Image (spheres, helix red, strand yellow):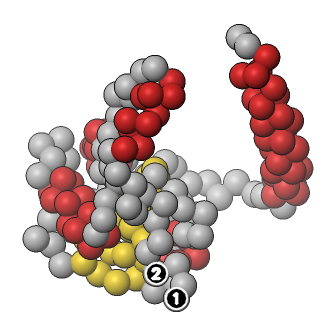
Amino acid sequence: MTTSASLPSEGAIAADGTVTDRLVEANGQYASAFSDPGMDARPVLHVAVVACMDARLDLHAALGLELGDCHTIRNAGGVVTDDVIRSLTISQRALGTRSVVLIHHTNCGLEGLSDDFRHDLEMEVGQRPSWAVEGFRDVDQDVRQSIQKVRTSPFLLHTDDVRGFVFDVKTGRLREITPA
Ligand SMILES: [Zn+2]
């Protein structure tokens, strides 16, 4: 390991530690007011929500969800990757969910990200990532593609109630996307 490589990571670890300390402290307060809701692992509303990891998207508040209501599966873009299909398969087959809600959003960090990102990354680190970046130009089309991927998955038990939306980060409103 070179000096130039280790210096920034040491700084990052220190910064992360400070934020994490704050989160752990907040958990202490949360736990002190927490009482066992006595739920099992199956979501009350039998629904799985697949959404972007975006920090402006508070799924529970935006959708009126309570603790225990749903599965939330999130990644950069809310992309239906093999791993999302893995989670949905477990969600449906082991934990009883039947509906899937897909939520992408306006002003997404993946919007406009091209395969140059992957290429530049490979040039920088000397290794091609095994995953696709999944950047997109048209958010509506991206939602349509995601709906299609879920609906055509052979692993899922329930593909009749799959709906997709774009969340507007400025208004907080969902806009439903008509499937292809
Ligand atoms: Zn996003």
Residue 168, label in figure: 2
Q: Is 1 placed above or below 143 here?
A: above
Specify the amino acid type for callout 1.
Thr
**For this rendering, which residue is in front, 175 or 158?**
175
Specify the amino acid type for callout 2.
Asp
| Tag 1–tag 2 contact (CB < 8 Å) | yes
Q: Is 37 placed above or below 41 here?
A: below
Please identify the quarter of the rendering in which residue 118 is found. top left
Q: Is 84 placed above or below 47 here?
A: above
- For the point 40% across and 82% down, the residue is 174
- Location of the C terminus by quadrant is bottom left
Image x and y of residue 43, in percent: 44, 58
Residue to which mark 1 is pinned: 171
Q: How many C-alpha atoms fall within 10 Å of the one at disc 2: few (<14), some, or many (≥20)?
A: some
Label 2 beta carbon less than 8 Å to ligand 1: no
Image x and y of residue 80, in percent: 30, 51
- For the point 46% across and 34% down, the residue is 121
Q: Is residue 13 visible?
A: no
Image x and y of residue 113, in percent: 39, 55
At numbered mark 1, what does the secondary structure look like: helix, strand or loop? loop
Q: Is residue 75 left or right of residue 11?
A: left
Please identify the quarter of the rendering in which residue 48 is found. bottom left
- Location of the N terminus by quadrant is top right
